[in-house]
């Protein structure tokens, strides 16, 4: 079946391997001839040098393969590490502790300025007083609450005399936004004038700092809300894409198993009528041609809706089949390279990768105007590495990836890569060709995706 459908191109793969082997052998022969001219009287040394050169070539090929895989892995791991670090920093920024941290700094600064037995900072949030930081005699919170309750009925002087504390208001344009409660000096003396001056200066700066922190906290709340909505939308997009893919699969099965079979049955009936001479030759030819065209179009549409060949034969053979089809339909050579080993690629990754490769190849054929397009698939550790490149006209990256450019294909590929938590890299410029690298993690699954969103 594979040979009949021209899926496995043994000849081209053999020629590629033969050419590489031929270059290595030719290099060895030339090197040996040169060495023999210099060491023909020392054959033992000649053979040792030959052995050393052969070993060096083998080591070079091995190291090239090993470090090539590791470079891809380091690149992907570094990107993932940056994402994790960004997430950690965002969590620290969005933890809502700006006001608490500022209050702690202010209270500690006051206590370093004046040796007192305790201090407390109260700030109004949404017009409700809230204790943000307290030390010493205010540590249990009861004294601060008593003072807050007394502020509505007693004057500041009465409160200070009754509870032996100092109450300083943090006011902004005659609007009180908070208070600083100070205990007594530990040596039992009163506050001196210069100490009051320093504390007033601290409170004035504290008011500006707390106002700024409050604005930042509000911005953080909005940012967290936006971030949460972004994750929800991303998760929704993933579920929507899965649903669309399943619907396309069902529609493809319906076209192939129902509509196509009915059309084929109709074709057989037309053949029967023709053999029974119940329909003339001219009418038969017209109907027959129309039915054959319809059968072809239904088959193509069914394959386009859902590539069952990927499920049946795997990613490598599916790309080979796509290669054959493109080479037959267009004046182009698709140069393929595979290094998938024995890796098991999840079904959803295979389907997504095949669709990406198909879209990128069609883009190269349509826009690049080149005779050769290269496709490389490689499994390195737990990643699938895809590269599609051409030496065509290239394009302006900023203009092409804008939503107004009309290049929906590249945008859809980028979105698919993002939903699979992969990396999408385009290297291109006008007149210098295009190389697109895609890295997809092979351990991706729905459960991992859900955990990713829940952790956000």
Image (tube, rainbow, N blue to C red):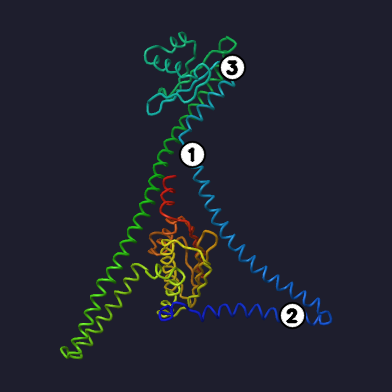
Q: Nearer the viewer, mark 2 or mark 1?
A: 2
The quarter holding residue 194 reads top right
* Vertical comparison of 188 with 237: above or below: above
Looking at the rendered image, the quarter that the N terminus falls into is bottom left
Report the Cα–Cα distance between label 2 and label 1: 66 Å
* x then y, percent, for residue 364: 45, 71
* Residue at the image position 57 percent from the left and 20 percent from the top: 111
Residue highlighted by disc 2: 32
Looking at the rendered image, the quarter that the C terminus falls into is top left
Residue highlighted by disc 1: 93
The residue sitting at the right extreme is: 41
Residue 325 seen in render: yes
Mark 3 or 2, nearer chain start: 2
SS state under label 2: helix
The residue sitting at the left extreme is: 278
* x then y, percent, for residue 316: 47, 70
Q: Nearer the viewer, residue 56 or 157?
A: 56
* Residue at the image position 70 percent from the left and 71 percent from the top: 55
* Residue at the image position 41 percent from the left and 12 percent from the top: 155
Give the label on residue 152, or none: none
* Vertical comparison of 455 with 155: above or below: below
Whether the residues at callouts 2 and 1 have beta carbons within 8 Å, the answer is no
Relative to 420, is 275 on the left or the right? left
Report the Cα–Cα distance between label 3 and label 2: 89 Å
Relative to 55, is 166 on the left or the right? left
Residue highlighted by disc 3: 115
Q: Nearer the viewer, residue 305 or 175?
A: 305
């Amino acid at each position: 079946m594979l040979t009949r459908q021209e899926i496995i191109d043994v000849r081209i793969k053999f020629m590629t391997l033969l050419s590489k082997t031929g270059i290595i052998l030719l290099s060895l022969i030339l090197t040996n001839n040169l060495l023999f001219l210099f060491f023909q009287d020392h054959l033992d040394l000649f053979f040792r040098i030959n052995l050393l050169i052969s070993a060096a070539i083998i080591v070079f090929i091995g190291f090239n393969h090993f470090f090539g895989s590791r470079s891809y892995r380091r690149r992907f791991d570094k990107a993932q590490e940056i994402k994790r670090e960004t997430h950690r920093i965002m969590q620290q920024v969005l933890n809502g502790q700006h006001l608490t941290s500022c209050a702690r700094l202010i209270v500690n600064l006051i206590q370093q300025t004046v040796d007192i037995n305790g201090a407390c900072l109260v700030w109004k949030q949404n017009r409700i007083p809230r204790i943000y930081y307290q030390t010493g005699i205010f540590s249990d919170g009861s004294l601060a609450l008593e003072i807050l309750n007394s502020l509505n009925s007693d004057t500041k002087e009465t409160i200070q005399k009754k509870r032996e504390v100092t109450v300083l208001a943090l006011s902004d344009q005659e609007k009180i936004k908070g208070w600083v409660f100070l205990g007594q000096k530990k040596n039992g003396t009163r506050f001196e004038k210069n100490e009051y001056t320093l504390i007033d200066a601290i409170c004035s700066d504290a008011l500006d700092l707390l106002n700024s922190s409050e604005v930042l906290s509000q911005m953080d709340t909005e940012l967290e809300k936006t971030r949460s909505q972004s994750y929800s939308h991303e998760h929704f997009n993933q579920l929507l894409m899965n649903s669309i893919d399943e619907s396309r699969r069902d529609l493809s099965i319906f076209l192939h198993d129902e509509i196509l079979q009915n059309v084929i049955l109709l074709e057989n009936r037309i053949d029967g009528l023709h053999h029974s001479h119940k329909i003339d030759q001219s009418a038969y030819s017209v109907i027959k041609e129309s039915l054959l065209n319809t059968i072809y179009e239904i088959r193509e549409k069914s394959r386009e809706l859902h590539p069952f060949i990927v499920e049946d034969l795997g990613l490598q053979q599916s790309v080979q089949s796509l290669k054959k089809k493109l080479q037959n339909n267009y004046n182009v050579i698709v140069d393929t390279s595979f290094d998938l080993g024995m890796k098991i690629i999840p079904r959803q990754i295979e389907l997504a990768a095949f669709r990406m490769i198909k879209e990128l190849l069609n883009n190269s054929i349509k826009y690049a105007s080149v005779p050769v397009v290269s496709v490389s698939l490689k499994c390195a550790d737990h990643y699938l590495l895809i590269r599609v490149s051409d030496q065509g006209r290239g394009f302006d990256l900023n203009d092409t990836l804008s939503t107004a450019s009309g290049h929906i294909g590249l945008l859809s590929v980028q979105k698919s890569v993002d939903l699979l938590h992969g990396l999408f890299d385009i290297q291109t410029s006008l007149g210098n060709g295009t190389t697109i690298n895609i890295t997809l993690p092979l351990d991706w699954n729905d459960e991992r995706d859900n955990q990713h969103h829940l952790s956000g």
